[in-house]
Amino acid sequence: EDRIRALEQRVELQEDEITVLKSSLSDVIRRLKDVESSTHHVGLRKPTPLKSRMAIEPLPSRPNVDNSPKSRVRPPSPGGRRRAPTTKDDHKNNAGDLSYIYLRRAASIDLLNRDNKRSSFRGKKSSGNGKQPTYNEEDCSVRMHLKGRPVVLYKPTNVEPAYNIASSSQLPDHKLKLEWVYGYRGRDCRSNVYSLPTGEIVYFVAAVVVLYDPKDGYQRHYLGHNDDVKCIAIHPDKLKIATGQVAGLELDGRPRVPQVHIWDAVSLTTLHVLSPFDRSVASLSFSKADGGSLLCVVDESNDHVLSVWNWQKETKVAEAKSSKDQVLLCEFNPHLDGSIVSCGKNHINFWSLEAGQLVKKQGLFEDHYTRNPKFILCLGFTSNGDVISGDSSGNVQVWTKGRKIAQVLDNAHEGPVFCISPVRDGFLTGGKDGCIKKWTEDFQPSQQTRLPEESGSVRTIASNDKGQLLVGTKKNMIVVGDFDSEFQTIVHGHVEELWCLAIHPSNQQFLTGAYDKQLMIESNLNIIKKITFDDGIQSADFYPSDNNIIAVGMTTGRWLVLDSTNQELITVHTDGNEQHDVIKFSPDGKYLGIGSHDNMIYVYSVSEGGRKFTRHGKCHGHSSYITHFDWSSDSQHIQSNSGDYELLYWEVESCKQVTSAPSMRDVEWATQSCTLGFNVLGVWPEGADGTDINSVARSNEGKLLASGDDFGKIHLFKYPAVQPRSSSHNYSGHSSHVTSVKFVSGDERLISTGGQDCSTMQWKVV
């Protein structure tokens, strides 16, 4: 399967390269036609047709003919990252781990992929061509290179006249502090919601472990991890927590080894770090019969190695190959010293730790099944130490202290049983059917409840200090309730890739939208409204004059406008059949611009207080999809970036390109979301390939600049950032590409969104 996946991705890469070649060819033809028309009076001959496989020379991001030397451009790889070659032996031993990391990190491609969805691949970085930015004093411009392509940026006259490109930059006067995390990872993780004696709920999303007190309304955050957290375990003393993360790649392509962190739940300080592991840490469990002196860990290597650690000494006590098939869980039996149970695809294994060795006995299904269940998905223990398991067919098995089934509860759920949670007088089960059932100690059902349909399947169950049930769901929500009352959602989250972020122009509200078709409006650390659409959401914006009116760009070529107060649909339009990456109202509210994946910017006139939209024109000239655009403060011009690193300017009235880029150097822009521009050139790292920076945002007061990159980092610069590789503070938390960053009204906070980690993070500016 891995081999097939690698071949499919190689084909996809080749398709993308062909698309880029076509795009570049289109750009060359367009520019040659411009030259032909402008020099026709001197008898310039008509250019001969160009062949599709010609060597394409990079052209500057301005129409002026440049006589400087040019170097050939290699078509960018997806997201600007190289793919590791996959060999037959890659999946037979640990030499395949790096290929696994590359394949695991492959996301929807940042360059016109088959699904037309922007994303990124956090793999080995392109080394670039090593060309340093240069300053031309004659026309006061900086020439930088992205993926070998020159980009010319013209210095505004208000920048220091004695500008020196070699000067050092200053750090900003402010910093960021993580204040709130929206989201929870329940869609593909299990046993990851717990209640602490402090009244806090502990769970994780992205690279952050969240400790949330719903009563007092605050969060604390453990930030020791540098990539996706995948599993969590609570020590018997309830004061120490172990969390495990996935592998990753450093900026230079070196593999980042998965780790287990043991940390203090009160001080949030890291006590111990255990490593190495392969690929990812799948499950963790503290021993309980001996008071928690040991920690068992199962990783996601080819053999799914089970290891037991003396975590206080950071030494490995024993390890053994668990199974070639996927292993989902490992748990210490709380009533039997040295007894461990693991389960997963087609198996359940019973382990005993004897004289530093792990001895395995496979569970036997023959007496009750003609063949093994496809998956054993969850584990629990009775008060006398018997093991309870749930399978993918909805059945629950009870195992005696040996390895045979004593009893089967057939059809306990309609569909897979995802979790088992022991309680004082029995145990609870939760399933894909959204049901939670309580069972007595003699395995009889006693109570049942069902989650609201919008909450999704039950992923994990815990109890809080009030005896209420805390339920994590596959739709990345955490709900609280019991058998006698309705469940209330206390944590909301997106389920699919997240790109859309819009900021309310006059208060602290903001909205997010994702490919899961959900639009959420957040305010005061709460989700105040959730709206479901028929299509995935790519972009959105608030109307400046009536902040209840919202424009939303979809992944299908549709865009719509609605009144968020009553969800009244004001208008629906379709422009093309590709996603609309940017949608923005002009500052005066008279226009709406839609930047599309079909290389166009569609402009509509807006009237009747944001309730009537009339096609004004379209800006046609980019040779790749629109990534960002900004309106001028007077709503008369647009600056835009595209997927092939162009910076173009447009006159709104005529929708024509302004071909003299130097004439636009002093235009005042209402926002600065374009990642290419003189005032933001300092955000680009050395050797950048053009897709590293997904988003930039200037603060409303114009003193700070934030950027979000492909490595889960948020950088805070002083604005303007006009020195190459300007100094910045950087912050971690997201485990996926940071797709958007924006300051809220008043500049007191910054909001960031993570693409595939589906999280939204709120940072306080301090």
Image: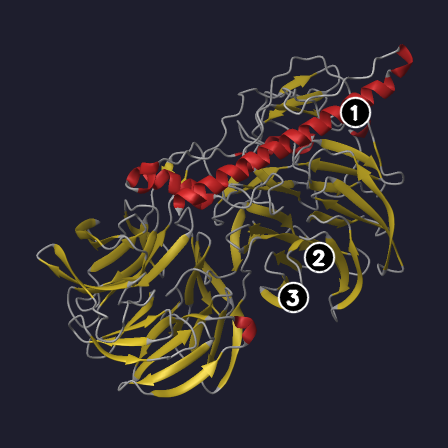
Q: Residue furthest top?
A: 42
34 to the left or right of 671 = right
Q: CA distance from mark 1 to mark 2?
A: 33 Å
**SS at circle 2:** loop
The local crowd at label 2, few if under 14, some if 14 to 19, many if 20 or more residues have their Cα within 10 Å, is many
Residue visible at 70% across and 23% down in the picture: 60
The residue beneath circle 2 is: 504
Q: Position of residue 86 (x, y in %)?
A: 39, 36
Kindly check if marks 1 and 3 are in contact, taking CB atoms under 8 A apart as contact: no
Residue 509 in sight: yes
Residue wearing tag 3: 532
Identified by mark 2, the residue type is: His
Ranked by sequence position, the earlier of labels 1 and 3 is 3
Gap between marks 1 and 3, in whole Å?
45 Å
Determine which residue is flagged by label 1: 662
Residue at image coords 39%, 49%: 225
Label 3 crowd (10 A; few <14 / some 14-19 / many >=20): few
Marks 1/2 in contact by CB < 8 Å: the verdict is no
Q: What amino acid type is highlighted by mark number 3?
A: Thr
Q: Position of residue 36 (x, y in %)?
A: 83, 19
- At mark 3, the secondary structure is strand
Asked whether, in this view, residue 301 is left or right of residue 465, the answer is: left
- Lateral position of residue 472 relative to residue 639, left or right: left
Looking at the image, is 477 positioned above or below residue 37? below
Q: Is residue 691 visible?
A: no
